[in-house]
Image (cartoon, rainbow, N blue to C red):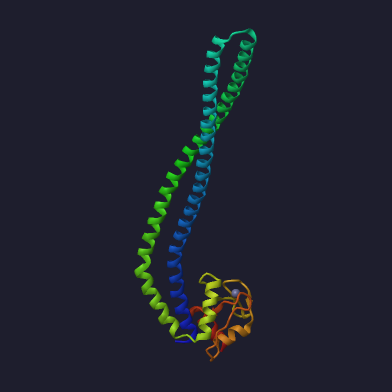
Amino acid sequence: MTLIDNLLTLYKVDRQVRSLRSRVESAEIYLKVQNRQMDAISVERTENELQLKQRRANIANIETETGSIDTRIDYLRQELKKAVNDKQYSALLAEVNTIKELRKAFEEEILVEMTFVEELELAAADISQRVEEREKVKQVAENELKVRKSEIAEQLVELESERSTAAAVIPEETLNEFDSLADDYDGEAMAAIEIIDLKRKEYSCTSCSLHLPLESITTMLGPKDIVVKCVSCDRILYLETESREAIMPAEK
Ligand SMILES: [Zn+2]
């Protein structure tokens, strides 16, 4: 086996490993999105609860105020009955009227606060519904991730061991180059050479479509086991068997 054949073996198994892992990764990303959305709803819920608490406390305070006003009015009415002269009576009546106005203002304030409470309660119901829905979606996402992980577990162990075997026969420097290309190109570390015109010796890289210098082809077909890379996209080049067979007689 030539170096390029070994690289091709590695390339194939490496892509299988990556595609298996990506099935789990996409499920992980999906679950993360659900968790983030859930967190956002939780923030909304906390804010809503805080506002409701404040508005209800406001109402309770105003009710305490109106309660003391009522007590005072009752007291003043009793005093009115006991009034001994007009001056005293007028003074008491004036106070009753003043605090009645105050009571009216408090009542209006309570109505405003109650409108806020109603709105906040509606929002709370909407939040609860969204939490419930999101919880269901999250559950599905968690199960899906579990299923995918267990589905690939066995196959992944097998493929990873195949990958290690394939990697073991490749010189370290070349392997490092391959790995970094595979990371950069999502597994697409290698590219086949396409014959554009055999007679005119025109070839291109199937990945980036760039025309390849003839030197790249002659080096590849030469006796030395050299890794040739595309001058544009940097991928490791290889020849499919039929391309090699088509070129070789032409090279003689
Ligand atoms: Zn290329």
Counting from the top left corner in percent of width and height, residue 95 is at: 62, 17
> Residue at coordinates 54% horizontally, 76% vertically from top-left?
180
Q: Is residue 119 left or right of residue 164?
A: right
Nearer the observer, 18 or 31: 31
> Residue at coordinates 63% horizontally, 76% vertically from top-left?
232
Q: Residue 106, located in which quarter of the rendered image? A: top right
Displayed-image quarter of ligand 1: bottom right
Nearer the observer, 190 or 110: 110
Q: Compared to 160, does 132 lie above or below?
A: above
Counting from the top left corner in percent of width and height, residue 237 is at: 55, 79
Q: Residue 231, located in which quarter of the rendered image? A: bottom right
The quarter of the picture where the C terminus appears is: bottom right
Residue 216 can be seen in this image: yes
Q: Compared to 192, does 42 lie above or below?
A: above
> Residue at coordinates 58% horizontally, 24% vertically from top-left?
108
Counting from the top left corner in percent of width and height, residue 75 is at: 53, 17
Residue 189 can be seen in this image: no
The quarter of the picture where the N terminus appears is: bottom left
Nearer the observer, 105 or 194: 105
